[in-house]
Amino acid sequence: MPEPAWSLHSRLKEDTIDIGDLPLSKVLVIKDAHYPWLLLVPRRPDAVEIIDLDEVQQAQLMTEISRVSRALKEITKCDKLNVAALGNLVPQLHVHIIARRTSDAAWPRPVWGVMPPLAHDATEVQNFISALRCKIWLG
């Protein structure tokens, strides 16, 4: 019997901009200009927790988290990276990678719910996406 098809959760679709696909994960930018905020979503149907991935996929996810985190830190020159797989509102497995600055609106608290999302400037977000795609080998 064929494996069920993977699709991106509707909430993630609505709240993000698609950057591209790494070997395991779809890379997305959260639509909130307050923070350079990325998501990695493993393209595996029914994955809710990291432990739902097999060991090879778990290792691949860690490789992708590291690659994207390094690129985000280099591009943003941030003070701190926040990396988390929470999934309390969206059950589909996804990993947040957020570049934080001691001067950002939420510092030192988590970013959730502190400020309403701020729309990205179209040119700035495209420049950010281009730089990120180059650094993580997507283009």
Image: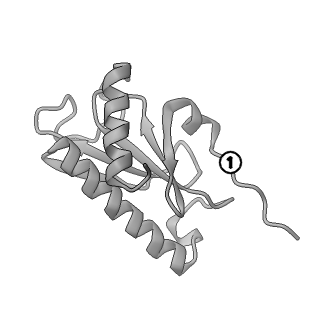
Looking at the picture, the colour scheme in use is one colour
Q: Nearer the viewer, residue 40 or 20?
A: 20
Q: Residue furthest right?
A: 1
The answer to whether residue 14 shows anywhere in this view is yes
The answer to whether residue 118 is above or below residue 9 is above
Taking the image as shown, residue 22 lies to the left or right of residue 108, namely right
User: Left of 104 or right of it: where is 112?
Assistant: right
Residue 112 is situated, as x and y percent measured from the top left of the image, at: 35, 36
Residue 93 falls left or right of residue 67: right
Residue 65 occupies quadrant:
bottom left
Q: Quadrant of residue 104?
A: top left
Residue underneath mark 1: 7
What crowding class fits label 1: few (fewer than 14 Cα within 10 Å), some (14-19), or many (20 or more)? few
Residue at 49% in and 34% down: 16
Q: What residue type is disc 1 on? A: Ser
Question: Foreground: 20 or 61?
Answer: 20
Q: Is residue 116 visible?
A: no
Q: Does residue 22 sit above or below 18 in this rendering?
A: below
Residue lying farthest front?
139
Name the residue located 53 percent from the left edge and 42 percent from the top edge. Answer: 89
Q: Residue at x 20, y 42 (%)?
A: 76
Of residues 51 and 131, the one drawn nearer to the viewer in this rendering? 131
